[in-house]
Each structure stands twice: as C-alpha cells, then as structure tokens.
Image (cartoon, rainbow, N blue to C red):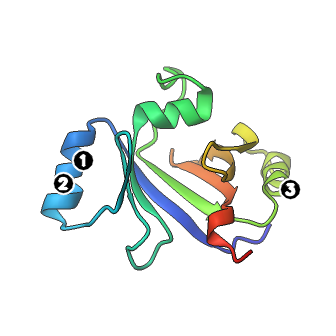
Amino acid sequence: MKVQFVTSIAPIVRDADVARSFYRDALGLFFEGEDGNYLFTQELEGTKHFGLWPLSEAARACFGTSEWPADIPVPQVSIEFEVLDVAAAAAELTESGYQLIHGAQTEPWGQVTARLLSPDGLLVAVCYSPSLHDT
C-alpha cells in the first residue's frame, strides 16, 4: 500500500455546538462548508480537509445507524489516508491481522472508504477521494 497524503482529519464530537464554538471562536478556524452538523474546511494549510464530525454521523457512516455500538470503543478522531486502490489496501490490512469496521464502500459524496480502529482507538480510513485528484 502506498499512502499518497493525509486526506482528512476530523475530531469526532459529541456536542456539535460546543465543538463549533471551540474551533471557530477560540481557535479562529474558518469553516466554509456545512452539511447538517458537519462543519468543514478545505482551506486549512497542512491538510486537504478538516472537519468536525458528529459521533452520530460517524456511526451512520460506519454501521448504518446513528448509535455507536456499545462494544466498540468510541473514537476521538477520524484520520483518512489517500490510496489509489482502497480494496487492495483494505485486503492488505486484513491480511496483516487488522479487523475492518467495513470494507471498501462508496460514500454518498463519492469518496471510497474502508475503515478500522487503530490500536490507539482512532477511526482510520484508507480512501480514494475523486475530488482531490486531477481528472
């Protein structure tokens, strides 16, 4: 697997309003986009995408329900690594003994992701984001 770059970093937040206040008002970050309670910017130097991801939406993306399963540790952050072949990267992780939350799937916004929890409990995705590549 060859990681091309860090695609996205998104703290997983339990209270969207409190998180918005901290990141926007206290740190002075500007969010140019919003999708429901998900705030994001693609204008923060050093990452392609920074967002505030409500836990309920992370649960929906991973498990198809707004509740995070009680038997799986709740992650504090999501980090995504861009790869050219998500299915191959997911297979490589599985072959190395890691358990995926889900295999390669296409998200409603067009990104292909496979996710797992890191040994430290971070929600990690290997992904391919068409919007970040020249066509």
The numbered disc on residue 19 is 1
Q: What percent of the width, then of the height, locates residue 40?
A: 39, 57
How far apart marks 3 and 2 lie (CA) works out to: 38 Å
The residue carrying pointer 1 sits among few (fewer than 14), some (14 to 19) or many (20 or more) residues within 10 Å by Cα, namely some
- Report the front residue among 97 and 54: 54
| Vertical position of residue 15 compared to residue 66: above or below | below
Drawn side of residue 102 relative to residue 55, left or right = right
How far apart marks 2 and 1 lie (CA) works out to: 5 Å
Q: Disc 3 or 2, which lies upstream in sequence?
A: 2
| Numbered disc 1: secondary structure | helix
| Vertical position of residue 17 compared to residue 83: above or below | above
How far apart marks 1 and 3 lie (CA) works out to: 35 Å
Q: Write down the residue under mark 2.
A: 22
Dot 1 amino acid type: Ala
Residue drawn at (57%, 69%) of the image: 6
Q: What percent of the width, then of the height, locates residue 125?
A: 63, 52
| Vertical position of residue 56 compared to residue 111: above or below | above
The residue lying furthest to the left in this view is: 26
Q: What percent of the width, then of the height, locates residue 5?
A: 62, 73
Residue drawn at (60%, 49%) of the image: 109
Dot 2 amino acid type: Phe
Q: Disc 1 or 3, which lies upstream in sequence?
A: 1
Q: Quadrant of residue 56?
A: top left
Q: Quadrant of residue 72?
A: top right
